[in-house]
Amino acid sequence: MKIDPQQTDESILLELGNRLANARLERNLTQAALAEQAGVGKRTVERLESGEVATHLSGFLRVCRALDLLERFDALLPEPKPGPMTQLKLQGRKRQRATGKRTISRESKQWTWGEQS
């Protein structure tokens, strides 16, 4: 099944769990063997494969690493590439901060001594 944005979180987790289970079975690994390779408990592998929400992301990453699936994360979250104008502005420097929304002040009235609002 293709993962669709309209699906609930639970159904997506269940689909990811099924895919992990299939990847494990393709490599002819038991849940216990995969857990040992990944450095997690067997129960963590069981939870991941069943799509239980209570699993930690680090356990998911460890299991994916043990199944040699980490390189596929690059397709999931590709590294952003700056556009040509941004590259020109940065001129080889790496961007370090995000700019927030700037508030535009309304017409400011020049202040002088003795004036009262």
Image: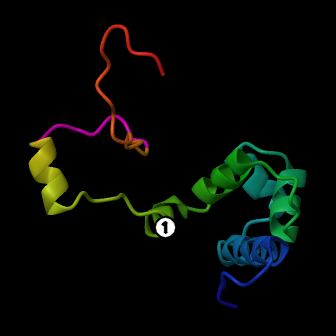
Q: Residues within 10 Å of mark 1 (few under 14, many from 20)?
A: few
Expressed as whole percent of the image width and height from the top left, the position of residue 68 reads 54, 61
Expressed as whole percent of the image width and height from the top left, the position of residue 81 reads 27, 59
Expressed as whole percent of the image width and height from the top left, the position of residue 99 reads 37, 41
When the figure is inspected, residue 32 is found, relative to residue 39, above or below; the finding is below
When the figure is inspected, residue 2 is found, relative to residue 102, above or below; the finding is below
**Residue sitting at x 52%, y 59%:** 70
Q: Would you say 83 lies left or right of 36 here? A: left
Q: Is residue 22 magenta?
A: no
Closest to the observer, 32 or 49: 49
Q: Would you say 109 lies left or right of 13 here? A: left
Expressed as whole percent of the image width and height from the top left, the position of residue 14 reads 81, 75
Q: Would you say 61 lies left or right of 111 here? A: right
Element type at mark 1: helix
Q: Would you say 34 lies left or right of 103 here? A: right
Where, by quadrant of the figure, is residue 34 drawn?
Answer: bottom right
Q: Quadrant of the N terminus?
A: bottom right
Q: What is the residue that sits farthest to the top in this orientation?
A: 113
**Residue sitting at x 9%, y 51%:** 88
Disc 1 designates what residue?
72
Q: Which residues are magenta?
A: 92-100
Where, by quadrant of the figure, is residue 104 drawn?
Answer: top left
Q: Amino acid at mark 1?
A: Arg
**Residue sitting at x 47%, y 63%:** 77
When the figure is inspected, residue 5 is found, relative to residue 1, above or below; the finding is above
Closest to the observer, 115 or 94: 115
Q: What is the residue that sits farthest to the bottom in this orientation?
A: 1
**Count of all numbered marks drawn on residues in the image:** 1
Q: Is residue 93 magenta?
A: yes
Magenta stretch prevailing secondary structure: loop
**Residue sitting at x 82%, y 68%:** 49
